[in-house]
Image (cartoon, helix red, strand yellow):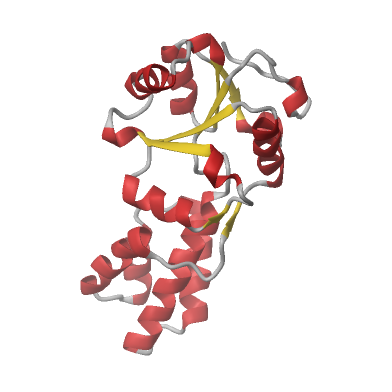
Amino acid sequence: MVHLLSDMLKYIDLDNRKKAFIFELDDVLYPERDYLLQVYYLFSNFIEFTEAVPPVADLIEFFKKAHLNHGDDGIFDRAKEVFAINEKYRDNFDRLYFTARLPLKLLLFSNMLTLLQEIVMDRKEIFIITNGKPEIQMNKIMQTEWNGLEKYIKVYYAQEINLKPESDVLSYILKEHNLLRKDLLIIGHTLIDQEFAVSSGVDYFNVSEFM
């Protein structure tokens, strides 16, 4: 069941019979761009420190524009072509996605923070099911400002069971937590999230409905 509403949703608008809420992580609970820009910032500083050129400000500005126009895929190759960055630094760049120690904590979208807090106050369960690589997603989660909510959230990495939109990970959660499909609501961002909800027979909202 897919809902398309014009007005911004709040927790009070949701079916109070729901017992648990499932979220994706990236661009649902926080803006993934905030993580990626800090990865690019750390790499830019590493390159300037190691090679002296390009200046860190120039490389950071390039990464910002490249991400805005093309996204993250292939961004190292774009920077390599423009700034003649040595191929030997590709491993350093890739490793940062897994190991980056961010200068700034990741902040939840304010509306999603409020939603999570209200779910917890209503004694409902919260799950994150994320399709991202577990090590990268864990690094993000560990550096997110959860405002005390972390102890109420259970995280499942779909890659360890079967990637969404396949419903295997949801079946696992149902069994582990003694829940029924009608008890759940999925909040996602992508077509994959929507297909996951449909294939699982679970109600779905796009996160944009809460923004």
Residue 15 visible at all: yes
**Residue 199 location (% of width, % of height):** 41, 13
Residue 9 visible at all: no
In the rendered view, does 186 fall on the left or right side of 196? right
Q: Total of numbered circles in the picture? A: 0
In the rendered view, does 199 fall on the left or right side of 108? left
Q: Quadrant of the N terminus?
A: top right
**Residue 64 location (% of width, % of height):** 52, 63
* Residue sitting at x 52%, y 71%: 103
* Residue sitting at x 49%, y 65%: 38
**Residue 2 location (% of width, % of height):** 58, 15
Quadrant for residue 8, please give it: top right
**Residue 187 location (% of width, % of height):** 57, 28
* Residue sitting at x 56%, y 39%: 28
* Residue sitting at x 70%, y 46%: 110
Q: Of 12 and 4, which appears nearest the observer?
A: 12
Q: Of 44 and 69, which appears nearest the observer?
A: 44
Looking at this view, name the residue that lies furthest to the bottom: 52
In the rendered view, does 207 fall on the left or right side of 9? left
Q: Quadrant of the C terminus?
A: top right
